[in-house]
Image: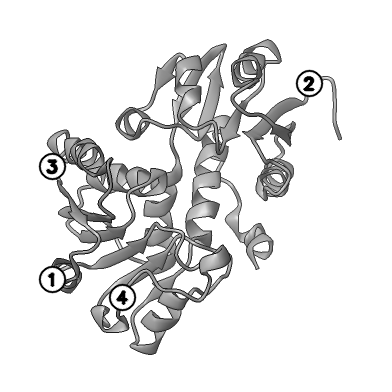
Amino acid sequence: MISGKTKLAGFFANPAEHSLSPRMHNRGFQACGVDAVYLAFEVDQTNLARAIESIRTLDMLGVNLSMPNKTTAIAYVDELSQEAQLIGAINTIVNQNGKLIGYNTDGIGFVKAMAETAKIKIKDKKITILGAGGAAKAITVQAALEGAREVVLYKRKNERFLTVKRDFEKIGEQTDSIVRVVDYADEEQLVRDLQTSELLVNATDIGMGTKEGQSPLAKATFLHENLFVIDLIYSPRKTQLLKEAEKIGAPAFNGLGMLLYQGATAFHLWTNHEMPLDIMKDLFE
């Protein structure tokens, strides 16, 4: 029951109405006995500053952020966590007695999903990532902080290639991991990297929407049975890449685990409770 002490948490994005987060977090609040509610709000660049200030004004627990707000929101918080500083984007804000702290739980969600769902630890592993956008950067940063041996990213060459390359390689300079960015068109190097990698992550949109049925790899023979294949896409649940991985007996996982665990991490930051993940599974079926 909502009371005079009920706290508010929310989702700031545009669009926001599609989000699974309200169902997930409200179910978590109820299960843990937390007197709070979670609502979705349409927030974009035009009203982001006022929306974030309302976290303080309304004494909210905090919020989740999605496009187009993850980068711009940095200017309106008081402090950034280590991974948020390295990534340069936030997806969670925590209100600590009026002090707003920005976090990025995407990479943490990926690492936890790998440990819990795929039963694989990131430490000392080599990871090949297809794509070099926001999700790829979050995973790269967290993998480096977790002690990954090497992270290799494949990005198509364009006018921003060298800028992106320098940006990602700085992550390696600030951690103990090797971080490289390679031209997506260099298929020979991609094959060599995959042969020495334990994980392949598709962080592109190839396999969803108008590109459904397509694979981000030119040939299925690039895969091998000892490679964990993770596609961050979760609609459709089984992309062409995952189908190709399953055909050769390679472990294959979609992005639902990352979605679930990044949300659980935000829930813990707000409440100091562990989200009861066992009662969330049906939301992702």
Q: Nearer the viewer, mark 1 or mark 3?
A: 1
**Position above or below: 51 against 178:** above
Residue 90's spot in the image, x, y percent? 46, 32
The residue where tag 1 is placed is 192
Extreme residue toward the front, this view: 159
The residue where tag 2 is placed is 5
Q: Nearer the viewer, mark 2 or mark 4?
A: 4
Q: Which mark is residue 176?
A: 3
Q: Amino acid at mark 1?
A: Arg
Q: Amino acid at mark 4?
A: Ala
Alpha carbons under labels 3 and 4: distance apart: 32 Å
Q: Amino acid at mark 2?
A: Lys
Alpha carbons under labels 2 and 4: distance apart: 56 Å
The crowd level at tag 4 (other Cα within 10 Å; few <14, some 14-19, many 20+) is: few
Q: Which mark is residue 218?
A: 4
The residue sitting at 73% across, 32% down in the picture is 36
The crowd level at tag 3 (other Cα within 10 Å; few <14, some 14-19, many 20+) is: some
Say which label, 2 or 1, has the lower sequence index. 2
Q: Nearer the viewer, mark 2 or mark 3?
A: 3
Left or right, residue 263 beside residue 140: right
Residue 259's spot in the image, x, y percent? 53, 53
